Amino acid sequence: MKPLLRLYEALRLLETARSPSARAMACSEALAICGELQATETAANLPYLASLVSMLRGDPDDRTVTAMLVGVERSLDKKLRDEDFLLHRDDSAKAVVTMPLVLVADSLRSSFNVGGLFRSGDCFAIEELILCGYSADPSDARVKKAALGADAFVPWSRARRVEDALLRCRGEGRFCLALESEALHPPLDTIELRWPCALFVGNERHGLAPSFLERCDATARIALFGHKNSLNVVAAAAIALAELRRAHEQRGGGATAPT
């Protein structure tokens, strides 16, 4: 393994080490590799190397270790997602009051986006995530990685077609709300909601079919103020769930204190 990649692995180990002895061992290994690099690389190739050595000798804290990793990641052209470096933390003992809402995702192309919906769904305590069409599910390792464990807290099911999910939600007496980006739809915060509710989000590129939107009780958009007219599906769903949770609390939803 090339020295720079070994340095990256050593710094990753330092980032996760918790005991003083493990941190000291990881620092020592990283310093030894830095010595190898100083003997083979010019200062122009790795301009951060001298400061990295100085930081390693100073018993770096967690923020400093992250700062050290950034330079090495960029030298290696590492393509990172937030699930690659966020800590897996939860408060399993917390009393959670679910919102009477299911989130329905139709044919998401990205497994990482599905994992992101699990995370958002857990944060706002939805009842269930329904995955339609070719959306991946937690049997996909990429979904599991992106969900950061949230799939253990959010019940989920599959529907072959989004229309099947709509029929199920109607049978449960849910207000069926579609989320789309076109300006012709009213802003989400102007919709007169009814509960229980189902929120439908569509494919990252194509959204939900116009014929499907006609069958929903309402279609809403998130008000945007910049040059671009759409959000990533996970960001859009998170904003919508936050607004719906706020509306639910205002009607006396009885939530626990947020964290």
Image (cartoon, rainbow, N blue to C red):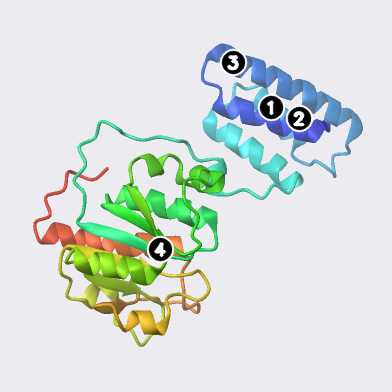
Q: Residues within 10 Å of mark 1 (few under 14, many from 20)?
A: many
Which of the two labelled residues, at mark 1 and mark 4, occupies the earlier sequence position? Answer: 1
Question: What label sits on residue 6 in the rendered view?
Answer: 2
Task: Give the amino acid at mark 2.
Answer: Arg
Q: Position of residue 200 (x, y in %)?
A: 34, 68
Q: Is 96 left, or right, of 147 in this rendering?
A: left
Question: Is 5 above or below relative to 150?
Answer: above
Task: Give the amino acid at mark 3.
Answer: Ala
Q: Residues within 10 Å of mark 2 (few under 14, many from 20)?
A: some
Question: Does the rendering let one see residue 174?
Answer: no
Task: Give the amino acid at mark 4.
Answer: Ala
Q: Residue at x 38, y 69 (%)?
A: 162
What's the CA distance linking mark 1 and mark 4?
A: 39 Å
Q: Is 56 left, or right, of 84 in this rendering?
A: right
> In front: mark 4 or mark 3?
4
Q: Are marks 1 and 2 in contact (CB under 8 Å)?
A: yes
Which of the two labelled residues, at mark 4 and mark 3, occupies the earlier sequence position? Answer: 3
Query: Regarding mark 2 in the picture, which secondary structure is present there?
Result: helix
Query: In which quadrant of the rendered view does residue 1 lie?
Result: top right
What's the CA distance linking mark 2 and mark 3?
A: 17 Å
Which of the two labelled residues, at mark 2 and mark 3, occupies the earlier sequence position? Answer: 2
What's the CA distance linking mark 2 and mark 4?
A: 40 Å
Q: Position of residue 140 (x, y in %)?
A: 53, 47
Quadrant of the image for the C terminus?
top left
Which of the two labelled residues, at mark 3 and mark 1, occupies the earlier sequence position? Answer: 1
The residue that label 3 is drawn on is 22
Question: Is 110 above or below relative to 44?
Answer: below
Query: Regarding mark 3 in the picture, which secondary structure is present there?
Result: helix
Task: Give the amino acid at mark 1.
Answer: Ala
For this orientation, the residue located farthest to the right is 40
